[in-house]
Image (spheres, helix red, strand yellow):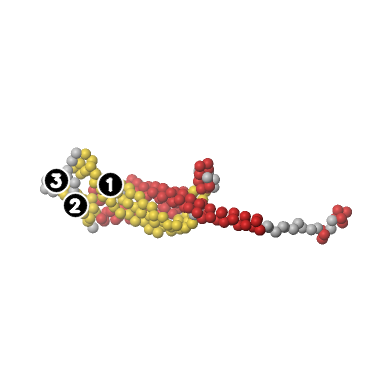
Amino acid sequence: MRFFRRFPLGRMRRPRLRPLRPRTKVLLLALLLIFVLYLRFGWLPTVRALVTMEVDNETSNLINEAIDAYLAGGGLSYEDLVTLERTADGDVAAARIELAAVNRMKSVILRELDQRIPGRIRESVRVPLGNVILPVLFSGHGGSLPVRVISLRSTNAALESGFSQAGVNQTLHTLSLRVEVDLLLLSPGGIFSRQVSATVPVAQTIIVGAVPNVLLSAP
């Protein structure tokens, strides 16, 4: 009790904060400005570049997986997609693309991608903080920056045909599916759109004799 009598609570004085000096204020503002500029022109572009690279790789993998799964599950063969028209001598005069079969294939693959991409990217694409702060020393370490698909704007596919030499009097005819995916992404680097494309062979055959002069499309 003697202690409280000597130092009554009502008489205790709180330490006063000294006002910041003008030089200190200017220094703090300068540091804040440097930090904001670093975020705007250094950190955010780096994050966006890393996110773009990860999203491109993961989306390309998904496109390949969807096409491989379709082919492994009994997808269409070359004969289902192309009809070769021959001359009286047996040479191939034209290759006719069966559009109905191609459209069925594209529909199945694009539907599979629409279901896979949003959840897969959200679960798989994460950029380690070490890759952003100091990649030379901390690459792959630290917490991860999440990436989320806001919307899957569109998925498109087009069939591409190519001929290449396969030997003496032989030509390799390859059919490839070019798939394009438009994404709207949310990441610590901001909201931005990204188009990813990949081309995957879906069927091929060797044509013996002259190369077809005409490539036709049939409904």
Q: Position of residue 161 (x, y in %)?
A: 26, 50
- Give the total of numbered labels: 3
Q: Amino acid at mark 2?
A: Val
Single out the residue that lies furthest toward the bottom. Answer: 10
Could you tell me how far apart the alpha carbons at marks 3 and 1 are, in whole angstroms?
A: 22 Å
Residue at numbered disc 3: 90
208 or 39: which is nearer to us? 39
* Secondary-structure class at tag 3: loop
Give the vertical position of 216 relative to 209 (above or below): below
Q: Nearer the viewer, residue 4 or 179?
A: 4
Residue at the image position 50 percent from the left and 52 percent from the top: 42
Mark 1, residues whose alpha carbon is within 10 Å: few (<14), some, or many (≥20)?
Answer: many
Whether pointer 3 and pointer 2 mark residues with C-beta atoms closer than 8 Å, the reply is no
Mark 2 or 1, nearer chain start: 1
Name the element at disc 2: strand
Callout in the foreground (2, 1): 2
**Where residue 168 sits in the image (x, y, percent)?**
19, 39
Horizontal arrangement in the rendering, residue 11 relative to residue 134 (left or right) = right
| Residue type beneath disc 1 | Ala
Mark 2 lies on residue: 214
Q: Quadrant of residue 167?
A: top left
**Which part of the image, by quadrant, shows the N terminus?**
bottom right
Q: Residues within 10 Å of mark 2 (few under 14, many from 20)?
A: few
For the residue carrying disc 3, how many other residues have a C-alpha within 10 Å: few (<14), some (14-19), or many (20+)? few
Residue type at mark 3 is: Gly
Q: Which residue is more in the foreground, 186 or 155?
A: 186
Mark 3 and mark 1 lie on one chain; the one further toward the N terminus is 3
The residue to which callout 1 is attached is 203
How many angstroms separate mark 3 from mark 2 (CA)? Answer: 16 Å
Note whether residue 70 is visible: no
